[in-house]
Image (spheres, rainbow, N blue to C red):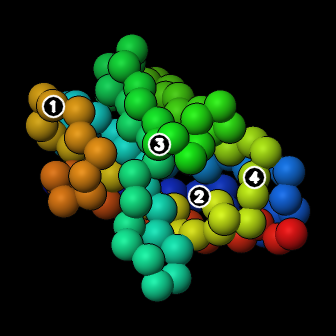
Amino acid sequence: QVQLVESGGGLVQAGGSLRLSCAASGRTFSIYYMGWFRQAPGKEREFVAVSKWSGGRTEYADSVKGRFTISRDSAKNTVYLQMNSLKPEDTAIYYCAAERSLSLSTIPGTYNYWGQGTQVTVSS
């Protein structure tokens, strides 16, 4: 099993920045990709960003390209999501997730482990 714990959410004004963290523990050697997803009220969970656990490959949703950056600290088993130029439409609960598959995926259903989520609220 893999345990994921997110932190770093909060309330920020439009144009501001936040950095989310996701600390992984347990059988982390089984992870190939770490992703960030978000879910706004009344909407489906959507892909935000993904990074290969060992480093190198990353992908982003079009809506966050150029504003968000996913990174990792392998020594701390932690993945980060730096969010800049935040917009009110970025308001959502943000979840990190871990995937055991060798194939990068942007589909929530393919991820094996999930954190509890952290709320991000962007005021206009």
Q: Is residue 21 above or below residue 75?
A: below
Instruction: Tell me which numbered mark, 3 or 1, is placed earlier along the sequence.
Output: 3
Q: Are marks 3 and 1 in contact (CB under 8 Å)?
A: no
Asked whether residue 23 is in view, the answer is no
Q: Picture coordinates of residue 20 (x, y %)?
A: 61, 49
Instruction: Tell me which numbered mark, 4 or 3, is placed earlier along the sequence.
Output: 3
The residue tagged 1 is: 103
For discs 3 and 1, the disc positioned in front in the rendered view? 3
For discs 4 and 2, the disc positioned in front in the rendered view? 4
Calculate the distance from the C-alpha at mark 4 to the C-alpha at mark 2: 17 Å
Numbered disc 3: secondary structure: loop
Q: Picture coordinates of residue 70 (x, y %)?
A: 53, 33
**Identity, as a three-letter code, of the amino acid under mark 4:** Leu
Q: Is residue 56 left or right of residue 62?
A: left
Crowd tier of the residue under label 1, counting other residues whose Cα lies within 10 Å: few below 14, some 14–19, many 20 or above: few
**Identity, as a three-letter code, of the amino acid under mark 1:** Ser
**Identity, as a three-letter code, of the amino acid under mark 2:** Ser
- The answer to which quarter of the image holds residue 9 is bottom right
Q: Is residue 25 left or right of residue 17?
A: left
Instruction: Tell me which numbered mark, 2 or 1, is placed earlier along the sequence.
Output: 2
Q: Do the residues labelled 1 and 4 touch (CB within 8 Å)?
A: no
**Identity, as a three-letter code, of the amino acid under mark 3:** Ala
